[in-house]
Amino acid sequence: MRAFIGKISETHIGALLALSYLLFSAIFWAYPFIWLIILSFSDWRFFDAPIFSGLHNLVVVLSDPEFWGGLWNVARFFSIYFPIAFVGSLGFAFGLKHVGRGKTIIALCFLLANISSGVAFSLVFAKLFSSTGPINNMVFSWFGFRIPWMSNPTLAMLAIALVVAWKFIGYYGLILYSGLQTIPKELYDAARLDNTPPIVRLVRITLPLINAQLIMVLVFTILVSFGIFTEPYLITGGGPLGRTNTPMMIIYETAFRRLQPSHAAMMSVIVAAVSYLLIRITRKLLEKDVKLA
Amino acid sequence: MITTSLRKLAGTKSAGSWLITLAMYGLALSWLYPFVWMVMASLKPTPEIYTTSLFGGELSLGNYDFLFSSATKLNRPFLGALGISFGVTIAVTISVLVTSAFIAYALARIDFPLRERFRDFLLLQMVVPTMMFTLPMFVLIKQLGLINSYGALIFPSMMSGWGIFMMSQSFKGMPQDYIDAAKLDRARLWHIVLNIVVPLNKSIIAIVALFTFTGTWDNFLWPLIVISDVDKMPLSVLLATFSKHYGVYVGPVMAGAVLQTLPLVLLFILFRRHFLQGMSLTLK
């Protein structure tokens, strides 16, 4: 009898605990979500009640060259950031596998960048990259010129990509490393017996077997590309000429500087939908269920 | 001869591996360069930061002194901001840890109705891009009258679906015997969670704690939007506005950057073992 009562009350407590989170989500997740949808299809300037305006916001946003510029900047950032982060983290994972003593300390040095302050290091890197900063001083003393990090659009984007890559290569690398650890050694021994060249071993054995981890890293790089705010906001301020302006910066400016929250809401919906769809497509095209027979 | 001793030192077996080990040590050191530069710059007078070598020049704590005394006169109260950052971050982290642990225990170990639906809901929340919630969350906070209050920084982050999910994945792998034994002793739920579940899952709890702390401490966009009063700004935003308006004071800005980084680095070093163990858990 006592056990019966105990079981019932435990089930109740479980349900109550879950309910507490559902209540929290209703207030801080579902309610804002509904507001987002309402704002996207209405005219609102922070004060009076929102007035339904149909697809007006969509038309305004889609005819805004700055918004398209922001999306194009995502593509530009990704095309610079992804190769750096991908090659860097693969190199880190393979390198770490060969390290004999001190794997932990090396991993920790790289991961320290990952948990560090984005705000602080945006400011630090802005100084490091500045025209009289240490990087340019070194380049100048060796080659006799300075790199215009902040005035050239591509170099400015590269600077931001390098900062973000510095932050994430250790994290991505550890993801790939954990994948490498699961590959059985016997597979390589067999390949070696067949005299398979290293590059073939990499492409035919290693990469397919860490497919899941590679996709995870790819998805993270896409998410970062759409979501960055702190680094460009503090390092370049979106310049030169808006060429490092990211969607999050444009949404922030539109809502809180130009006081057009309903336009910004529509932008948020579009950007979120595009990033979500891209990730779904990536998964569909590249994700393979690799099994060891 | 040299190569063999180097190989021994690096602890590697195959030839060539010691070279990679050496290169990895070199890279790891170069990864720390921005930290070292930041700390050294924060100890030098501003005019000497760009002109002296990394470890050269006169070192003093003048920039920190400036940050805590003169900056306050420039309406940039850094000491207060440091306190606000600590208060808000600790409140959020404790709240997330406690709520996540209990709800995760329910999700992993208690058979309540619609449990699987609840798990699906958590997964759904994790795939919906969070970036689109910033603006409507501002609307909610405005309606609640919490603009320019600490509540705006704390309440929206008091629970975490990610934290619940991560902990429940870890709690599932725990041997049931421990819990059964405690139940035989008629231990109450809070006793089971705090005295049995938590000590057995330290790594994942350290991970959730560290990421929650870092995410809250270093959050920039959200406090930038909801706090406009300099007396209520957390350190991340105050530092950014200080750098924007008084950017010529490079030394004090770097001292602020050190303050903003220090708690994160200390926590990371303190929890490093749990962190690496927990990482392999979250990566699966």
Image (cartoon, helix red, strand yellow):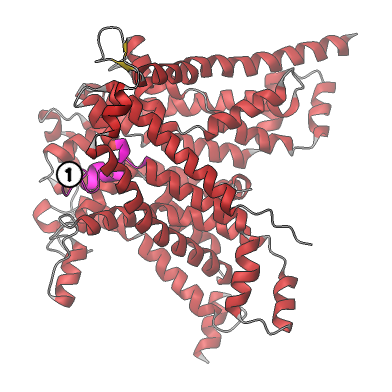
- Compare residues A270 and B202 and report the one nearer the observer: A270
Mark 1: which amino acid?
Pro
Q: In the rendered image, is residue B85 in sight? A: no
Q: In the rendered image, is residue A22 in sight? A: yes
The magenta segment is A227-248
> Residue A208 appears in which quarter of the rendering?
bottom right
Residue A42 location (% of width, % of height): 32, 16
Residue named by callout 1: B252
Residue A251 location (% of width, % of height): 29, 32
From the viewer's perspective, tell me whether residue B280 is left or right of residue B115.
left
- Residue found at x 28% / y 41%: A68
- Compare residues A242 and B257 and report the one nearer the observer: A242
From the viewer's perspective, tell me whether residue A219 is left or right of residue A68.
right
From the viewer's perspective, tell me whether residue B72 is left or right of residue A185.
left
Dot 1: chain letter: B
- Compare residues B225 and B194 and report the one nearer the observer: B225
